[in-house]
Structure formats: structure tokens, C-alpha cells
Image (spheres, rainbow, N blue to C red):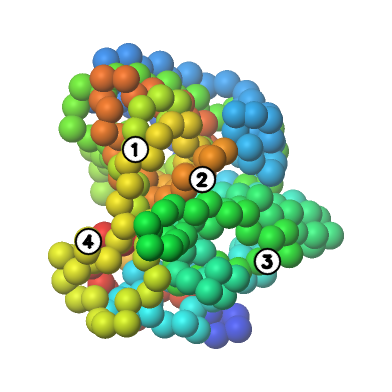
């Protein structure tokens, strides 16, 4: 497998190709995998609906054109103590990766803390036009006040930054076929994304590495999600300290989650799955699992990526339950 390394503005970019099976093949693998974890599963391949419309709320219509996974940074920049220099310009990084034309970027990361004066979650949904105009429909979720309320806020249109880490699915926002997944009533222990990812990993093994990205809606039920509190002033070194530092909520549907999954680490120190969700109320955060298996209902639109680009891989490995 070929790999390229480039360095720009002090950031190292590494790229590797991903295995791209036909969507119809992924359809049957995912149907089988989810069928072991949900009572009702329907996976199909068809034209992507217009994701700009309700109930989706994204800034571009489709997931087609140069589909790419991007991972930058990682939890080692957050712990044991934050590295405040790690602020990535998503506009510049995605332009460099995708080349000319429109860019549509969705996924999970740490929010641009300088605009909130606090650490926060980033829920990314932005596009860059052919002539480099940024349209930002992204959100932050922040833990605020004595009551530790979850506050969801729009990121200003002109703000291009993400802090510390990100996992984005890049495309040109073009229409085209995608995987359409519906799953209802969870009967197994795996969360929605674990069930898909592990099913793909089992089927495709060590040599054929699959990456998917896109959007899933939690249409009914409650979801266990975290929002990072402000940066810790004392070093966070153990998983127990991480858990104490994160603020967990049971967030009600509807939640719209954007992000990526990949079946293997690929020697790039990859985060294997990472989805953050926004809502049309005050809720937003990092998806863990639903807590209402009997009534939960998921609906997803995912596309398969052709390559993974790893940017600014942290120099040392850390535990990874946060972000
Ligand atoms: Zn996260």
C-alpha cells in the first residue's frame, strides 16, 4: 500500500488509500452486522436525499465527489494538560487535501475554544466554495454555569478553526448513491456505530481497510453523550480522571450525528470511530450509545471513502476515551 508524506506549515500530512467495495456489497455486510444487534434493519443503496433540508440540516446536499477521511491531532494534545497551540485551520487543511473545487466537511472535533473562552465540543458541518468562501453551519457544545448545562451554539460563519483533534468526512457535496440505513429496537449490546464498524472489520479483515463517513439521526429515545468540561488545571493521566472530567448527559432525540469510522488503525494512530451530534434544541455532544433500546430508531446516510489523510499525528500515544 502506498503512502505519501508531505509537510506544510509545520504540519505533516500522511495519506493512504482505502479499500472501496461497491456500495451493494457494503449493504449486505452491514445488513448482516446490524441484524445481530437490532430487531428491525433495512439497508439500501440509493440517491442521497437533499441533506440541506429538514430534518438533516447540513450545509451541502450530498456526500459524493472525492470522498476522503481526515484525521488531525488527537487526545495526546489534550492530556495530561492541554496544548493551546493546537488550533487547526479547517479551511486551509481541507483545501490542501481536496485540491480545487467545492469542499464539504462534516464530523467530530474539539471546538475552537478561543471563541467560547472555554474548551468545548465541535460538531462540524461546513463547506468551502470553489472560490474559497466559507459557509459554516458548525456548532459547539459547552458545559456552562453552576448547573453545568449543555449549551449548543452556532460557530460564526467566518470562523475556520478546530482545536486539538478532528475526524472529518470530506467530499464535494455532490449528489449520488449512498448507503441508507434504518435500524430500530436495539437487541444487542453494541452501539449503532460499533455494530457497523465491527461487522465491516470482521468481514474485510486486516488487509482491506474500509472507511465510512456521513450522517446518522437518532429519531427516538435517549442517547448517552459527553461534553468536555473546560481544560483541566491539573494533569489528567488515568481513565478514571478522564471520566470524572467529562460531563455526561442523557440527551433526547432528535440528534443529528456527523462523523467517521474506519476498520483499522492502518499504522496512522487513527481513532476508529468518532461521531458528534447537534440538535435543533440546546443539545449536542459526543455519541456513546442510546439508553432506550426498546424504542430507539436510527437512520443513516453514509458514503465510502477512497483514502485517509492523517495530519499532525501526535508524537506519542495516549489513552483515548475522550474528546
Ligand atoms: Zn468526541
Mark 3 / mark 2, whichever is N-terminal: 3
* Spatial separation of the CA atoms under disc 3 and disc 4: 30 Å
Mark drawn on residue 188: none
Extreme right residue here?
A: 131
x and y percent of residue 177 in the render?
60, 28
Can residue 126 be seen in the rendering of this structure?
Answer: no
Q: Note whether 173 is above or below 180 in the view shown.
A: below
Mark 4 / mark 1, whichever is N-terminal: 1
Q: Does residue 75 appear left or right of residue 15 in this picture? A: left
Write the residue at 69% across / 61% down: 156
In the picture of the structure, the residue carrying the numbered disc 1 is: 223
Write the residue at 60% across / 71% down: 115
Mark 1 / mark 3, whichever is N-terminal: 3
Count of numbered labels shown in the rendering = 4
Q: Note whether 7 is above or below 196 in the view shown.
A: below
For disc 4, the neighbor class at 10 Å (few under 14, some 14 to 19, many from 20) is some
x and y percent of residue 94 in the render?
63, 62
Closer to the camera: disc 3 or disc 4? 4
Could you say whether the residue bearing mark 4 is in a helix, strand or loop? helix
x and y percent of residue 230 in the render?
40, 70
Q: Does residue 128 appear left or right of residue 201 in this picture? A: right
For disc 2, the neighbor class at 10 Å (few under 14, some 14 to 19, many from 20) is few
Mark drawn on residue 282: 2
In the picture of the structure, the residue carrying the numbered disc 3 is: 159
Mark 3 / mark 4, whichever is N-terminal: 3
Could you say whether the residue bearing mark 2 is in a helix, strand or loop? loop
Amino acid at each position: 500500500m502506498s503512502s505519501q508524506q508531505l509537510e506544510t506549515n509545520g504540519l505533516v500530512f500522511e495519506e493512504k488509500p482505502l479499500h472501496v467495495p461497491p456500495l451493494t456489497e457494503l449493504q449486505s455486510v452491514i445488513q448482516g452486522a446490524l441484524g445481530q444487534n437490532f430487531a428491525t434493519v433495512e439497508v439500501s443503496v440509493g440517491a442521497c436525499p437533499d441533506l440541506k433540508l429538514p430534518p438533516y440540516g447540513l450545509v451541502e446536499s450530498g456526500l459524493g465527489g472525492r470522498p476522503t477521511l481526515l484525521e488531525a491531532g488527537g487526545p495526546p494534545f489534550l492530556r495530561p494538560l492541554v496544548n493551546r497551540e493546537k488550533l487547526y485551520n479547517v479551511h486551509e487543511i481541507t483545501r490542501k487535501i481536496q485540491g480545487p473545487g467545492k469542499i464539504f466537511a462534516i464530523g467530530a472535533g474539539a471546538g475552537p475554544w478561543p471563541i467560547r473562552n472555554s474548551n468545548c465540543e465541535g460538531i462540524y458541518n461546513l463547506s468551502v466554495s470553489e472560490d474559497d468562501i466559507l459557509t459554516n453551519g458548525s456548532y459547539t457544545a459547552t458545559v456552562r454555569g453552576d448547573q453545568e448545562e449543555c449549551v449548543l451554539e452556532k460557530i460564526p460563519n467566518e470562523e475556520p478553526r478546530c482545536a486539538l483533534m478532528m475526524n472529518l468526512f470530506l467530499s464535494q457535496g455532490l449528489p449520488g448513491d449512498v448507503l441508507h440505513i434504518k435500524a430500530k429496537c436495539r437487541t444487542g449490546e453494541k452501539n449503532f456505530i460499533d455494530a457497523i464498524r465491527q461487522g465491516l472489520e470482521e468481514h474485510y479483515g486486516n488487509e482491506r481497510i474500509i472507511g465510512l463517513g456521513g450522517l446518522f439521526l437518532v429519531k427516538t429515545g435517549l442517547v448517552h453523550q459527553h461534553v468536555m468540561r473546560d481544560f483541566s488545571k491539573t494533569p489528567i493521566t488515568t481513565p478514571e480522571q478522564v471520566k470524572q472530567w467529562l460531563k455526561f448527559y442523557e440527551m433526547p432525540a432528535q440528534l443529528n450525528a456527523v462523523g467517521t469510522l474506519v476498520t483499522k488503525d492502518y499504522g496512522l494512530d487513527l481513532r476508529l470511530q468518532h461521531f458528534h451530534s447537534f440538535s435543533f434544541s440546546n443539545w449536542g455532544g459526543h455519541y456513546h450509545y442510546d439508553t432506550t433500546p426498546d424504542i430507539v430508531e436510527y437512520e443513516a446516510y453514509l458514503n465510502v471513502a477512497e483514502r485517509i489523510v492523517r495530519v499532525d499525528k501526535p508524537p506519542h500515544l495516549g489513552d483515548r476515551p475522550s474528546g
